[in-house]
Image: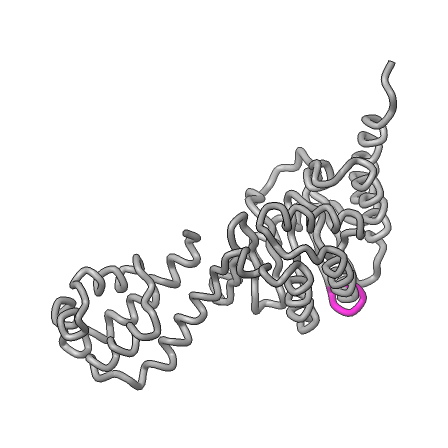
Amino acid sequence: MSSDIRQARESLGFKLREVRLDAGLSGRELAGQAGWQASKVSKIELGRQPPTDHDIRVWLEIANARESEPDLVAELRSLESKYVEWRRRIRDGVKARQQEIGRLESGAGRIRSFQCSVIPGLLQIPPYMRERFRRSVDIWGARDDIEEGIKARIKRQDVLYEADVHIVMTEAALRYGTAPREILMEQLDRLAVATSLPRLRLGVIPLRESYAATPLHGFHILEDRTVLVETFAAELTLTQPGEIEIYVKIFDSLAGVARYGREAREVIARVLDDLHAEAEPRD
């Protein structure tokens, strides 16, 4: 479980514990009146088991604290939205997911994005998109609407001309075999051009650069309100100020060692030279 989710569960459990204590109830007394096993109360309070809406309502009714229900149920909703299985996210196809992200981005005047293993979606060319979406269909069983998904992702890229966008990626993301060599070379040509877009700040971190923060995974910061974090099995939507502050700090540290403008193009050109050399026939 993500530490962010664990902390959110513990926070909700602590608040429910405070409600119980204010009512002068022991955990065993609360469980007895609710018809639960005594261990359920302790698990919820320690963040080991998330409560349901019904659990919260029963808890507050027994403690005579129904006025707290809207806030605590809202906190539960926030917790549930933090962890959403990819299969649920993309069950309606890749197009729906791209449209969902596009709506979030269109409401943001400032976007910061970091990727350590793939080219960011806002900078992908259609053939590269097709490779990425095909793998989503194969691995997660998404509905195969790849061509519609490509159109939706291309539409998302309008934000590059409408918002202040700062993207940082590692040189490794340029080199990984996330697409066939010919497609990757075409994609890197596009990146070199993107370094000159007026509202885009595009940074590349050289392979042997000393990192201030270990690049464990990619993430997307929308304004200072939301952070989207992708894992193999799920997507986290982080909205707590403390969580966002951590990701902003990490992004700033990564951006601080990235190369921009001419220096970024030099890194891209070096990778392209290596890819061209690999493609040349050998004696």
* Nearer to us in this view, 169 or 33: 33
* Nearer to us in this view, 91 or 85: 91
Tell me if residue 278 comes above or below residue 241 in the rendering.
Answer: above
Residue 88, magenta (yes or no): no
The outermost residue toward the bottom is 67
Query: Residue 24: x percent and y percent?
Result: 14, 76
Q: How many labels does the image show?
A: 0
**Colouring scheme, one of rainbow, by chain, secondary structure, one colour:** one colour
The residue at the point 20 percent across, 74 percent down is 20
Quadrant location of the C terminus in the rendered image: top right
Query: Residue 126: x percent and y percent?
Result: 80, 52
* Nearer to us in this view, 214 or 14: 14
Name which quarter of the figure residue 180 lies in.
top right
The residue at the point 74 percent across, 65 percent down is 164
The residue at the point 51 percent across, 63 percent down is 238
Query: Residue 64: x percent and y percent?
Result: 21, 84
The outermost residue toward the top is 283
Name which quarter of the figure residue 57 lies in.
bottom left
Query: Residue 274: x percent and y percent?
Result: 80, 30
| For residue 63, side relative to residue 180 (left or right) | left
Name which quarter of the figure residue 197 lies in.
bottom right
Tell me the magenta residue range.
Answer: 160-164
| For residue 35, side relative to residue 71 (left or right) | left
The residue at the point 45 percent across, 69 percent down is 78
